[in-house]
Every structure is written in C-alpha cells, then in structure tokens.
Image: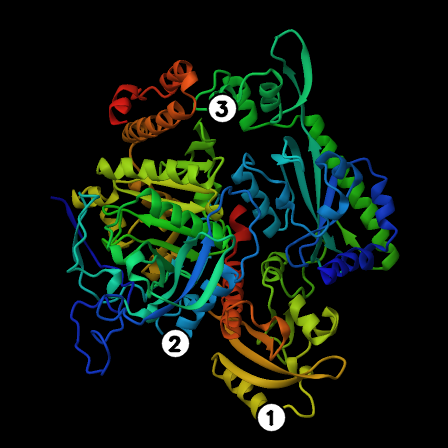
Amino acid sequence: MESQLGLIDQSFNARYTSWVREALDELPDNFTITDPSISGHPIVFASRGFLKMSGYLKDEVIGRNGRIFQGPRTNRRSVMEIREAIREERTIQLSLLNYRKDGTPFWMLFHLSPVFSKEDGRVIHFVSVQVPILRKLRSEDGNRWQETVFGSCRREVCSDTVIELARCRALDSFVDSDNRVLEAEESCEANDLEKQKAATAINSILSVLTHYSEQTGRLVCGKRCNSSVMCPLSSSLNISLGRIKQSFVLTDPHLHDIPIVYASDAFLSLTGYNRHEVLGRNCRFLNGPDTDPKAICQIKESIQSDQACSVRILNYRKDGSPFWNHLHISPVRNATGRIAFYVGVQIEEGCKNEGTRGLSPEMRILGTVGAVKVAVRSLSMGAGSSKS
Amino acid sequence: MLRIKRVPTVVSNYQKDTEEETNRQQVGCGRNCLRSCCIPGANLPLYTFKRMKNMMDEKRDSPVPFLDSLLLGEWEDRMQRGLFRYDVTACETKVIPGVSGFIAQLNEGRHLKKRPTEFRVDKVLQPFDGSKFNFTKVGQEEVLFQFEETDGDEAQFFPSAPIDTDNSPSVIAINVSPIEYGHVLLIPRILECLPQSIDRKSFLLALHMAAEAGNPYFRLGYNSLGAFATINHLHFQAYYLAVPFPIEKAPTRKITTLGSGVKISELLNYPVRGLIFEGGDDIEDLSNAVSDSCICLQDNNIPYNVLISDSGKRVFIFPQCYAEKQALGEVNPELLDTQVNPAVWEISGHIVLKRKKDYEEASEENAWRLLAEVSLSEERFEEVKALVFETIACREDKNETVTHSLDAESEELDVINIGTDRTMVPGKQECLVLQ
C-alpha cells in the first residue's frame, strides 16, 4: 500500500508539480482524478466538493477505485458504458446513481474525460466531474414543493412518515402505487444547465492541469494531439495489465532487440528499477557476471521456436544484489492469432510472499501468463472502432 | 418427435464414440476418470467460497485469486500439457464494425470431421442416461479443481483434497474445444449425475462462481436441451473475453421490481427477445428469481439460454425456438449452411464461425439476421413472459404472506395489480393451494 501511495504522489507531482493540488482545491466543483497506469486504476485526487458530497474522508478515497461509490440500485448498464468509455479513452456523460458513505443514494450527472500527454498522445489521467441532479418533488401532502435529491427521496419519505417497514417494502414491491416516482428513480435525466455545468467544470480542471504541466515541461491536453509517435501500449491495455499483481514484463519481438514495452509494478519493486529505466531496453540488463550462459541460451531458443519455457536464472537488481529468478517466458498472441509479445514472469526464489497460502509459484506464474494472454487478445480486437 | 442433425461439440478428450481399450497398467478403468472405479484415493485441488450476502459488497481478499491465479493458472497448465484440441489464442477474432459490436471468431478446428448426430429438440427435460457421455467419464487431468461452499468465515484453498464421494463435489473442468481463453465447465455435484436442468441450488452455485471470479469479462452461460446443449449432464460454461458483449450494451426497459428488490427488464432493440434480472437485497434473491423463471420455462417445455454477466450482477434469460424451427425446416438454408448453432454465446453476440468465407463476410446485418431467427415472436414472447411472471408472482406472494401477514389484503391488491402487463394472470388461488 505504501508503495502504491508513493506511485500516486508521483503520478501527480511529476506531471503537474505539487502546487497543483492547491489550485484544484480552489475549484468549487465535485470531481476526482484517476490514473489508469497505476494498478487498480485508483483515484489520485478528490476535490473538496466531492468529499463533502460523498461523505468520505480524503484518505478513504485516494488509492481506491471509483466503483466504491456504486450500490445496489446503480444501473449496471451505465457502469458498463463507463467501463467501455475508459477502455476506448473517450469522453462520456451520463446520469448515475451513486451512494454516499452513509449508504444513501443520490443521482448525479457523471462526466468523464481523458487527459492526454501532449508528447506521445497517451492517456495520463481521467477527470470525472459529478454534478448532483436536484429536482423539485412534490411532497406527501401535495401542497409544498420540496427540494430533494432523487433516489434518496422515497426511502426517506417512507421512514419519516412513520409508516412501518413492511409498508415500505410493499411500496417497493411489484408495481408501486406511485409509478411516477418509480420511473423518475429508474432514470434521472440531467437538464441542460447541469450538462453545461459539468462541461464547464471539465474545462476549468483541464486548464489548471495544462497550466501546471507547463511548469514541469510534461504537457497535457484534453484532446489527443499526437498519436503517431510511438506509444507502446494503449491505456486500456495498461489498465488491464495493471490489474495483474505479479512481476512480469512484456517484450515486443517485432521491434529491434526485443525491448520491454510494459513492466508491472511488482517487477519494478523486485528489481529496484524505475519504469522509465526499463522501458525500451532488452531484458538482458538483469543478467550479471554469474548468470549461466546456458540459461540465456535456453531463453533465446524458446523465443526462436515460438515456444514457452521455464528457466531458473541468476539475475541482478539495480543495486547489484543477485537473486534466483524462476522465469517463465511465453509467446502472447493478439486477436489476429499472431504472436504480438513475449511475456516474462518472474518469481524470486525463497521470497517471503512466495507461498500465497497453498497456490504453488508455478500456478501463479501460469495464471499471470493466462491473464496477460486474455488482456492482449481482447484489447487488440478493434473494440474501439465499434462506434464507427 | 422433433430432431435435428448436428455435429456434437467435443468437450472432453474421452468423448470418443469408440473407446479403444488401453493397455496401461492402472487402477480402475485405466482412464483415471471420476467414476467409482477410479475415484478411491484420488485428489484434486479444492477452492471453498464463503456464501456472499450482497452483490455490492466489495470482494474480500481471498487466499488465492480465484480467476487470475487459480482458474487461469490451471487452464494454462492444461494448455502447456497439450490437452486442448487447438490453441484458441491462435484463432483470429474481431469486433464487427457497427453499433452493436458483434464479435466474430474464425475457428476451423472446433468443427472436426465428425459425423453429425441426431438430437431430440422437442423435450427440454430428459432423464439422465448413464450410457451416454457424461462428465463422470472425463479424465481427472481435465478437472481443474473442486468448487464448494464453506461454513467458515473466508474462502480457502487446498492444493490437494480427496474427492468426497458422499458429498458429491462440484467441479470445474476444461472444455477441450474452447471458444475463448479460460473456457471451462462448471459441473454441480458431478457424482449426482443430474440431467441438464436448472434448480435453485445449482444456479446459486453458478452465480457464486461469477461473483468469486469478480471480473465482468468472465461470464457464465447455460443452454437447455432444445437450445443447443449437447450433453444431458448438468453443466454451465464460462470463459474470459475482455470485450463488452452486444447484449450487455443493448437498451432495456424495466418491467417490474420484485419485493426482494430484484429488477426485471426486457431487452429493447436487440434481435433476440429476452429478460434481464438484476439487483436484489441478497445474492440469493436474484438467484431464486432467475432459477424460478428457468424452472418455469423448462417445466413448460420452452428451450432457453441463460447468460450470467457483470460478475453475477446481471442475468439474461432468452427463451428460444431456433432448433424447433430447424427441425420443422423453417430456417433459411443459407443460415443453416454456416452451421452456427445459436446457443448462449452466439445470442449474447459472440459468434464462432467455422468457414473463412463467413468470417470475412461477417457483418452486423448477417449477425442480426441469424439471431432474429432465434428469437421468439413478439406474441409468443408475451405469452412466455406472462407464464414466467405468474410463477414469480406466486413465489413472491408466498414469501410476502409469510413475512408480512398483516398486510395481506393490500398485497393481494398489489399482486393483482401486477397486470400492467395485459397478459398477466393473477395466480393467487393456485398458489394458496400449492402452499
């Protein structure tokens, strides 16, 4: 967890300087910022307004995935649409029923927008603005108009008016006597004002982020400006791979010298390198004076013959300390059925978390290979073009 | 009697018509199967899950990641041991351009040169027949692990556990003709030799497996007899494909919410008519609503398919009539030529094609045309819906009467009111008798 928080700080500070938080905190809007390159696609920033609205403390939100705000009545199809927008790296705006920390639901207009790196067109962050949807609702007596937030209203009315719980259940059951309220609860369309508010909020957040990214020289922008430059993997593949907790790298056999194009967090902590120090390099930097040339040879042969192989090989960390690496290498095919990458999974011999209560290291290695195969195959199927 | 001819899918390496006797010196029948001849002394990994209360509970950390380490690890292991008939990741696949995003796969290896077999398609419930192929005949190496509920506080994993023949274990086995990576079969209480039909307990197990996997792209499916199940031994299928299925994206219209909070909707603007179940206070509420509906369909001899999606949070049911039409000679011969059997995955929008030509020409129109043949007509769907709702309303009513007997009168009104749907039949009387 500690290292994850470190990554979160780094994700933000390295790109926008540490001053950006203050500037974002001055914005009145409810929003969160997430980083798809960190495992679990966690929230890396939550605005004051958002915390107030959701009832969570900052520490309870940072590092978590946005799904913690969903509840039993959250529309599953909407959740799926958001998931798809994230994998396609595009903007989406829809009404969503979320839940506060105390369990009460509230309708809001959810507006998600990617933030791109100007340099290589990669998605750096996603900004999610949430505008609460407020509606005038007729209260029980029918005379007064009451400002309330949809979704929470009916249950509150039930308990407030001292009708026993059974009655409340009956209301919920089958066809409610009050269909009007029910339908409103099923879908709560935001009005133009709210849509405008969300769009304006996105713009002001983007302008803060852009401004501060100029100070680090690592510019971001709201539109993908340069996708032609080499960008090893899409952020959707990054997100999928980020969920896999084991130490592994992907290498691209179609590029010169088979460089690393993805390195998992666990790989970085195992070897002690930073991500930018390993991307683009051939894996041989892990070898050292006492590495057995036969093992290296075996790896080469398996790659040449498109075969998987397992070797026990002496590798070296950045600080020079050696470790025995149970390395498994396997070809990974993309949707066309051709080999797109090789995955190398590492497990350090005798390391303390080796025994995940019963599952053998071999099985964990193979599970990682499987998860990588699924991610690569699925994300090269051209799902992004389905909207064409 | 209605029959169709089709090439049966080979799900196990032991599913050969002619069984060559092997000379191996081994205990039992020599095939290391799951019958009484080979089970004594046999061990398999065992994963036990804790019964989940609420679907929305964040998944607790299990000792072993169910999907990413255990299931995929064991599956990849079988792949490296060469137990599959082909490498499914070498099969070309694509998302067909269009609004729906149908997924096509070219799989020339799945369809081996086997003689077509006759299948009876006009009886959804048929008794188990031990003389035909069933999952007790698969080799133990095709079984990945046992999957059981635990009374304990947390999920547990045992790398090697004896097979407890007295409490017929539920197992997860590979499908040797996978249609995607991680394609497995869940066989509830395998030794009880249950025929292919849904019951509450087995469906809850399937829902727990989806929840335990905890990944929206790992889905489970079920085909009834008459809706392209080929083996009459209770099983669910599952595989891992990290792409949204067209069915999951289709717009829906809410029909009703049950007292338990389970919401039932119907699909709109999709070639196959179907019902969607989601929500509920408890995972068992959702499970019961779905299994009661399935039981109603099979009892009424209506073939159907089920998709468990979104980690068990959404369940789709499609009554279908393709096989019946096929047997009656009412299906367009061009569609038959493709030899696509529209079972649960095809209906959900993942279509496995056997001919290169069909793969290359795959289009949204073609997929739509195929699936439209699978769907019930609007009138028939309304009838079936009414039948299903009558059943669920009865069950609901029964539960409500028990828990809130004070409100009996107003609830009676509610039940009768269910009929926003014109074909709804209030089944109060009948239910009381049943009770």
Disc 1 marks a residue whose amino acid type is Pro
Q: Nearer the viewer, residue A110 or B271?
A: A110
Q: Position of residue A101 (x, y in %)?
A: 67, 38
**What separation in Å lies between label 2 and label 3 (alpha carbons)?**
55 Å
Q: Locate the C terminus of chain B and report the quarter of the image it occupies.
A: top left
State the SS at label 1: helix
Could you tell me the amino acid type at mark 3? Arg
Residue in the picture at 34% in, 28% down: B389
Residue B81's disc number: 2
Q: Position of residue B308 (x, y in %)?
A: 42, 46
Q: CA distance from mark 2 to mark 1?
A: 27 Å
Query: Disc 2 residue type?
Result: Arg
Query: Which residue position is annotated with label 3?
Result: A169
| Discs 3 and 1 lie in a common subunit | yes
> What whole-number distance in Å separates the C-alpha atoms at marks 3 and 1?
72 Å
The subunit carrying tag 1 is: A
Q: Are marks 2 and 3 in contact (CB under 8 Å)?
A: no
Asked if badges 2 and 3 are on one and the same chain, I answer: no
Q: Which mark is residue A253?
A: none
Label 3 resides on the chain identified as: A
User: In x, y percent, where is residue A4?
Assistant: 72, 60
**Residue A134 spot, x, y in % from top left:** 68, 24
Q: What residue is disc 1 on?
A: A293
Tell which of A163 and A41 is nearer to you.
A163
The residue carrying pointer 2 sits among few (fewer than 14), some (14 to 19) or many (20 or more) residues within 10 Å by Cα, namely few
Q: Please count the marks in the image.
A: 3
